[in-house]
């Protein structure tokens, strides 16, 4: 009887350890991403993220193999596998443009909404996005479309004070919050879809002709 009791105790202990291990793995898998990124970004080469660095190593003078605010932002953007909704006031960063174009080339569905007064300013990358076949809309309202956010795969939100410009990335005190909290992501998805619909060029044309 004693050996039977010992055996049952060992079995129960083993089962308990297995259950605790499963719970830890489950909690780890459910961990939600929350991250804060501050700018200006440190200087560093990002070609390993944007280009075929294994075939064509970069020989630029910037530090290589360093993690910067810009590289962290790029990694989050380039994690997109199905969709990217981008709502930005100004977009002149070449590196961020290359990231969006790379996603488009991989088949990611991309929608871009920007301010009508800043789409055509000197250095704007919006024209390159349109030329590549990416759908871009500008706001039709009388106030600035001053949002700065992106939604990746309808599950990851990137938002903050950062305009997608070289000046903001390298020269300004800026911030970004990156989160997968559903309660925070969902309202931005709804707001983007609302703005996307009301700034549909076909709708604007219909309203102007029927007036």
Image: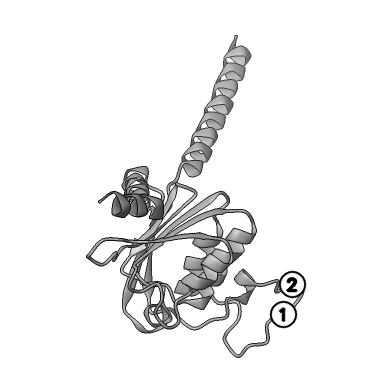
Task: Give coordinates of residue 78: x percent, y percent.
Answer: 55, 61
Label 1: how many residues lie within 10 Å, few (<14), some (14-19) or many (20+)? few
Q: Identify the element where label 1 is drawn.
A: loop
Would residue 195 be seen by someone viewing this image from the given angle?
Answer: no
What is the total number of numbered labels drawn onto the structure image?
2
| Nearest the eye: 139 or 101 | 139
* Labels 1 and 2 touching (C-beta < 8 A): yes
Vertical comparison of 155 with 110: above or below: above
**Residue furthest top in the image:** 1
Residue sitting nearer the eye, 204 or 172: 204
Residue depicted at x 33% and y 61%:
139
Left or right placement of residue 188 versus residue 71 in this view:
left
Determine whether, in the image, residue 130 is placed left or right of residue 86.
right
Mark 2 neighbour density, 10 Å: few (under 14) some (14–19) many (20 or more): few
Q: Residue at x 29, y 49 (%)?
A: 210
| C-alpha span from label 1 to label 2 | 6 Å
* Any part of residue 68 in sight: yes
Residue at 55% across, 21% down: 12
Whole-percent x and y of residue 141? 26, 61
Which residue is more in the foreground, 9 or 176?
Answer: 176
The picture places residue 109, in percent across and down from the top left corner, at 54, 52
Rendered-image quadrant of the N terminus:
top right
- Return the residue at label 1: 57
Residue 148 disc label: none
* Disc 2 target residue: 54
Q: Position of residue 138 (x, y in %)?
A: 37, 63
Image colouring: one colour
Quarter residue 119 falls in:
bottom left
Dividing the picture into quadrants, the one containing residue 146 is: bottom left
């Amino acid at each position: 009887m004693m050996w039977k009791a010992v055996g049952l105790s060992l079995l129960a202990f083993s089962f308990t350890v297995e259950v605790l291990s499963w719970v830890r793995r489950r909690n780890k898998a459910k961990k939600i991403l929350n991250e804060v990124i501050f700018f200006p970004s440190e200087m560093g080469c990002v070609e390993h993220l944007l280009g075929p660095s294994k075939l064509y190593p970069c020989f630029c003078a910037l530090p290589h193999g360093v993690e910067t605010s810009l590289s962290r932002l790029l990694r989050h953007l380039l994690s997109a596998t199905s969709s990217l909704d981008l709502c930005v006031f100004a977009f002149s960063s070449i590196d961020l443009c290359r990231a969006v174009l790379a996603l488009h080339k991989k088949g990611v569905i991309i929608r871009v909404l920007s301010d009508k007064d800043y789409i055509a300013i000197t250095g704007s990358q919006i024209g390159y996005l349109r030329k590549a076949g990416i759908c871009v809309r500008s706001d039709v309202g009388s106030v600035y479309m001053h949002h700065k956010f992106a939604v990746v795969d309808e599950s990851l939100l990137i938002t903050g004070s950062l305009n997608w410009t070289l000046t903001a990335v390298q020269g300004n005190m800026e911030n970004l919050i990156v989160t997968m909290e559903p309660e925070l992501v969902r309202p931005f998805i709804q707001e983007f879809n609302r703005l996307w619909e009301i700034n549909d060029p076909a709708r604007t044309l219909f309203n102007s002709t029927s007036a």
